[in-house]
Amino acid sequence: MLGAHTPTQQMLELHNATVTFSAPGGPLVRAVDGVSLTIPGGQFVVVIGTNGSGKSTLLGSIAGTVRLDGGSIHLAGHDITRWREDQRARLVGRVFQDPRAGTAASLTVLENIAVAACRGRRAGLSWATSRSLRAEAASRLGGIVPGLETRLDQPIGSLSGGQRQIVTLVMATWRRPDLLLLDEHTAALDPAAADRVVQATARLVREQNLTALMVTHSLAQAASLGDRLLLVHRGRIALDVHGAAKRRLSPDDLAFRFDRLRSADQLDEAAARSLSELYV
Amino acid sequence: MITLLSTWTFGVALGFVALGVFVSYKLFSFPDITTDGSFTLGAVVATVLLVAGVDPALATLGGMLAGAVAGSCTGMLHAILGIEPLLSGILMTTALASINLVVLGRSNVPLSGVKTLLDRAETTLLPAARLLAFEGAAAGEAARLGFMLLAAAGAVLVLYLFFRTRLGTAMRAGGDTPTMARALGRNTGALTVSGLAIANSLTALSGAIVAQYQGFADVQMGIGMVVWGMASVYLGAALVGQVRLGGALLATFAGSVIFRQLVAAALRAGLDPDWLKFATAVVVLTALVAPRLLVRRHQASVAR
């Protein structure tokens, strides 16, 4: 039953989650390598990692775009391991890296919001937009970006990337999701727009007391945002800090840890190469 | 007078194909070749039912439903089996070529002596046509055209209203940006199947009406219909430019009527009917390329 969940429980539980990719003719790659993770309700978790570390695959396996090869995922008391992407959307709100992926360009701003207002419900044959939806959309959007409330009837494709991401954020949280997934949602924006989207994100997460998982490339965001930080490396969680330790983290600390991981990698590869030279 | 009216009637009848192609191609970005097969299917099913003595309205509805089934099959080939849109349509329309022949029994069946939906409409609307000062055979043709226009207006209105409901809006979103629709809990496969069912039921409705208008069904009559539909969609879009849903639906319909007038004019001017489909292809090509060329010229002039 939806809504039977109490906030004190664990919201998201990954148990030994594994995703394996095989490049054609290449070796098997464990993009997610037996990750176990629990996130309590109301926690804002920031995820960082190098390119190819598996952080996006981890997010995809929670959203349902990537199937697990092993392990399980529980969300808000449901075993969602075998749920399809559109079924998981009952519980999950998402914002993508590409503003074009999260909104339908040919629909108006209000029509996009109307689709979001039905997230996880039967669509049915009642009117998509109504006066009350319009009023609520105007107040919610205008509260974040003054002026946006006057553009409800324009195609959303006419908005800037940053404005579109803010509308996508409002859409993802229109009905309070059990989990908000943000997949590098500021990476495609210019710094000023990225900053506005980050502020809107922090505000919505705080106001609705959301459980959120945000992947980012920005070490500054990773240091300043959220209650907990995960550093993903080679499909595993290499670092997990929260509480006071998280608050003490600076972007420089994170850059230093990144470099250490990278150099450890190179040592591994060099060792592997010398071993293979010995035995082949 | 009658010839002029009849090119109008034909243009309106084929406008349902244009609406179908608008739904599949413009709303779902699905180039649906099934159109050729489902146009014939609608004609064939309606004709067989009429010959068997079924009420004309029910026979027309039967043709429409058959088209919906064909469209859902194409949708399922794509959504469930993962076959790409063009190939799904080609497979379905190839299969329909046999199905249409089997249903009709032979390649051509006349509707002589059978009361059709258009005969009924003519009887009902004849007084109105006479009031508008049409006389003799022209009054009958005008009554048929009047019926077609009413049916067309009804179809445009129903589509417009439907695509503004929650379900219809979700379908448009799914056709536009599948990632967004799935992230908001919509099963995009199911949306595509329903969209193609709607599109092909409109196409089949057109086939059923055309068969009753011309007085026979022929297994070849659907050839080139998808191109006709696209020509109408593009002509309509070229006429009105960027408009909302309602405007685009009306423009599509207008595109079909205008295109029929162009074809009639070309034939009157001495175009060999053998070259008709060629000319249609050229019109679609022009409609596809011209806007892009215009934009490029505009950009070049702005850059200068």
Image: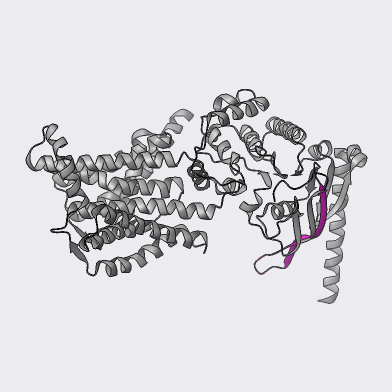
Q: Is residue A134 above or below residue B101?
A: above
Is residue B143 rendered to the left or right of residue B250? left
Dominant secondary structure, magenta: strand
Q: Is residue A234 visible?
A: no
Query: Which residue is painted at 22% across and 61% down in the image?
Result: B218
Q: Quadrant of the C terminus of chain A?
A: bottom right
Is residue B161 rendered to the left or right of residue B10? right
Q: Looking at the rendering, which quadrant does residue B240 occupy? A: top left
Q: Is residue A197 above or below residue A73?
A: above
Q: Looking at the rendering, which quadrant does residue A179 occupy? A: top right
Q: Is residue A57 visible?
A: yes
Query: Which residue is painted at 21% across and 44% down in the image?
Result: B9
Farthest residue, direction bottom: A280
Is residue B187 rendered to the left or right of residue B104? right
The image position of residue B196, as x and y in percent, is 43, 53
The image position of residue B198, as x and y in percent, is 40, 51
Q: Looking at the rendering, which quadrant does residue A177 occupy? A: top right
State the residue in front, A141 or A163.
A141
Q: How many marks?
A: 0
The image position of residue B163, as x and y in percent, is 45, 41
State the residue in front, A28 or A105.
A105
**Is A33 a magenta residue?**
yes
State the residue in front, A128 or A18.
A128
Q: Which residues are magenta?
A: A18-42
**Is A217 a magenta residue?**
no
Query: Which residue is painted at 37% across and 58% down in the image?
Result: B34
